[in-house]
Amino acid sequence: MENKVLTVLKIFVIILFTISGASLGYIYSDYIKLPYNKFMTAVLGGFAGILVGSLIAIYLSKFLRWFLPKLDQLFSNFSVVDILIFIFGLFAGASISLLFFPFLQLIPVVGEYLKALLIITLSLLGAYISWKKRAEIKQTLSPAKTDKKSFLKYFIIDTSAIIDGRLNEFLQTGILEGIIVIPGVVLSELQKIADSTDYLKRARGRRGLDTLNAVKESRMLPIEVVETKKALLSVDEVLVEIARQFKGVLITNDYNLTRIGRLKGIRVLNLSELSYALRPQVLPGEDLNVAVIREGKEYAQGIGYLDDGTMIVVEDGKKYLGRSIEVTVSSILQTSSGKMIFAKPK
């Protein structure tokens, strides 16, 4: 499709320059000292237009092949509403500048130049203001909700939640409604991790990028990238500041960031806490299927894990290493680091 569009554009440019060259040759033939009549001069102008148009079409095609992917990458981070708000700001600034035109006409010589300068300045200023305030504009234009928690519309995602890998599955549940906000510092941090020389860090960073791509392609929630110029702040401070600015929910898997955010009055959703809260309840006497993956500390013990990471200590389970067996829960021990389940083979 892209090649067809570029081909049509080349043909259009060549035809445009051909007609322009022929027209100029015909109109200005009296001023050009050539031993030809107007018709021949127009033909020569047309050939010159073909030559110039072909050269321009070639270089224009090369430029567009480089520029269009950049443009697509730029606008892929913004929704249609964001672009419309930006265009509205341009037109609003240009319209306001028209009010000053009657006064600028009274200024001799430079009045026309001041008009052009004013319309450019106010258009850019209007676009800048509307872009900075786009979150408030969208919130104002959106229909009012009776839900008391309707202000929980923006969800700010940090690096740990993206790398965790469960973010896309969590969003697929459909329990969140609003806009995903990705701070620019988080993308920069994620890129550094993905480019790390350490194999494990690089793998985690690439998994985070894959997670973001999956979230974007699922189109469950719109994604908005927010840049900040507060370079002196740490990444955690930027996240808290953006969450406060948007009055949104900070989604993280970082224990320290969770505590800092809540101390500063920010609503924080910790994925690990959510996973722990939704863990399956196991009671003594229940039967489970467990894969024994390693030896325990005590004699003949085997160790397995539930899907949520809860450790299961299997008595006399050493001989079942590398196998999945049916066990019966004998007791449950709650410790400061989590829950441990003791079981016996059936």
Image (cartoon, rainbow, N blue to C red):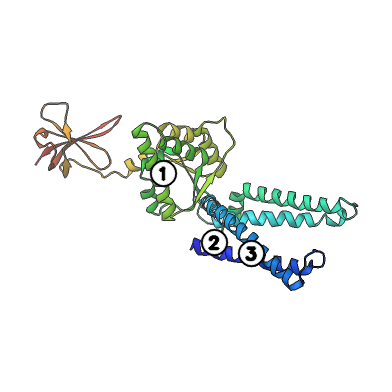
- The total of numbered circles placed on residues is 3
Gap between marks 2 and 3 measured at Cα: 17 Å
Residue 14 appears at what percent x and percent y? 62, 64
> Which quadrant holds residue 35?
bottom right
From the image, state whether disc 1 or disc 3 is nearer to you: 3
> Which quadrant holds residue 324?
top left
Gap between marks 1 and 3 measured at Cα: 47 Å
- Which residue lies at the image location 71% right of the left edge and 56% below the top edge? 92
> Which quadrant holds residue 193?
top left
Instruction: Check the image and report above or below for 216 versus 324.
Output: below
What residue does disc 1 label? 209
What residue does disc 2 label? 6
Q: Amino acid at mark 2?
A: Leu
Residue 53 visible in the shown view: yes
- Which residue lies at the image location 76% right of the left edge and 53% below the top edge? 119
Residue 236 appears at what percent x and percent y? 49, 33
- Which residue lies at the image location 58% right of the left edge and 63% below the top edge? 10
From the image, state whether disc 1 or disc 2 is nearer to you: 2
Mark 1: few/some/many CA within 10 Å (<14, 14-19, 20+): some
From the image, state whether disc 2 or disc 3 is nearer to you: 3
Q: Nearer the viewer, residue 182 or 23?
A: 23
Q: Nearer the viewer, residue 139 or 16?
A: 16
Q: Tell me which label, 1 or 3, sits earlier in the chain.
A: 3
Q: Amino acid at mark 3?
A: Ile
Q: Which element carries disc 3, helix, strand or loop?
A: helix
Q: Tell me which label, 1 or 2, sits earlier in the chain.
A: 2
Q: Tell me which label, 2 or 3, sits earlier in the chain.
A: 2
- Which residue lies at the image location 78% right of the left edge and 54% below the top edge? 97
Gap between marks 1 and 2 measured at Cα: 32 Å
What residue does disc 3 label? 50
Residue 171 appears at what percent x and percent y? 40, 51
